[in-house]
Amino acid sequence: IVFFLIFAKKMYMKRIVRFLCVFITLLIGILIISNSPYYSPAEKQGGITVMQHDDDTIRVAYIGDSWADGHKKVKCVIDSLVYFAIGRPVVVKTAGISGLTSKNIYYGIFRNDSIRRVIEWGPDFCFVVGGINDTDRKMGKGYYKENMRLIIDFLLENHITPIILEIPSYDILFSYKRRSRQVKLQYLASMFITWSKMDCIEDYRRSYYDLLDEQGWNNQVITISYKDWNPDGYKDKRGIYDGGLMHLNAKGYLILDACIANKIIDNINASLGSENH
């Protein structure tokens, strides 16, 4: 019995030591990662020239993450809807890359050939969809807010009206559950580092509206709230999401395109109204 107790005590101590070693290793890893550039927002860039036009064509850029990438694969109706309402030629160009965070989207304006060309083309409006991967990976609401500030500031400086899609609803818990064990651990570490909840979408949304208030951009930036086109989120009974409940299907893009077109039409009509007074 005495031998068994001594043996059990040694095994218990070994487990404690092993646990402490793992815990300390994880803590050191988290501290190293938290001080790495990974969680740092983008730095201000420059060096591209945006074309200026003197014609009546309405040019619309559509940039961002996988939602923008998916838009390239469906029939766009923004151009036809705006044309029928305004009576002016409309051209829409899309450039998007799956997996981009808001930081990557900003850098993409300067460093990615497809996104840069769409911006250099000189659009009148630029629709930006981003933040989905920020929330999915728990990059931090400060990270998202600063990158959106850089994106919007660049567009306004170049006389491009930003149309920002509020971070759309998606099944963020389902997205986490289908990840590998390694990715899950990374996301959990990110939650600890950035103080993000598992479902942090609403927190990040609020940081965006705080940004607009702080910068005085409410009248310069067109925002498309999820309530404008998709109030029920991924649970929408119209069936506008794909099976992963994270991306739109063709029907979803049709609904979102209609909302974008209406925002552009309202903006142009408001501008014409102000010119006539």
Image: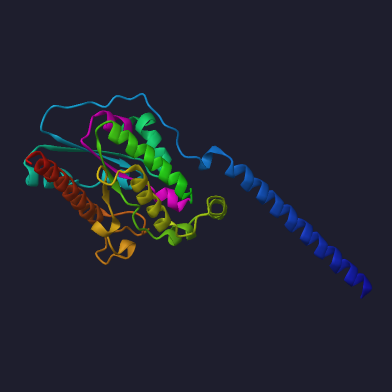
Q: How many marks?
A: 0
The scheme the figure's colours follow is rainbow
Indicate the quadrant where residue 241 lies: bottom left
Q: Quadrant of the C terminus?
A: top left
Please, which residue is most extreme toward the bottom here? 1
Q: Is residue 228 left or right of residue 6?
A: left
Residue at horizontal 27%, vertical 33%? 118
Q: Residue 54 or 137: which is nearer the viewer?
A: 54
Range drawn in magenta = 115-137
Q: Is residue 69 left or right of residue 92?
A: right
Q: Is residue 211 magenta?
A: no
Picture coordinates of residue 9 (x, y %)?
Answer: 85, 67
Residue at horizontal 32%, vertical 30%? 116
Q: Quadrant of the N terminus?
A: bottom right
Indicate the quadrant where residue 217 lies: top left
Whether residue 100 is visible to the viewer of this picture, yes or no, is no
Picture coordinates of residue 6 (x, y %)?
Answer: 90, 68
Q: Is residue 236 left or right of residue 214?
A: left
The correct choice, above or below, for 54 with respect to 89 in the image is above
Q: Residue 52 or 212: which is nearer the viewer?
A: 212
Picture coordinates of residue 99 (x, y %)?
Answer: 41, 45
Picture coordinates of residue 257 (x, y %)?
Answer: 21, 50
Residue at horizontal 76%, vertical 56%? 18
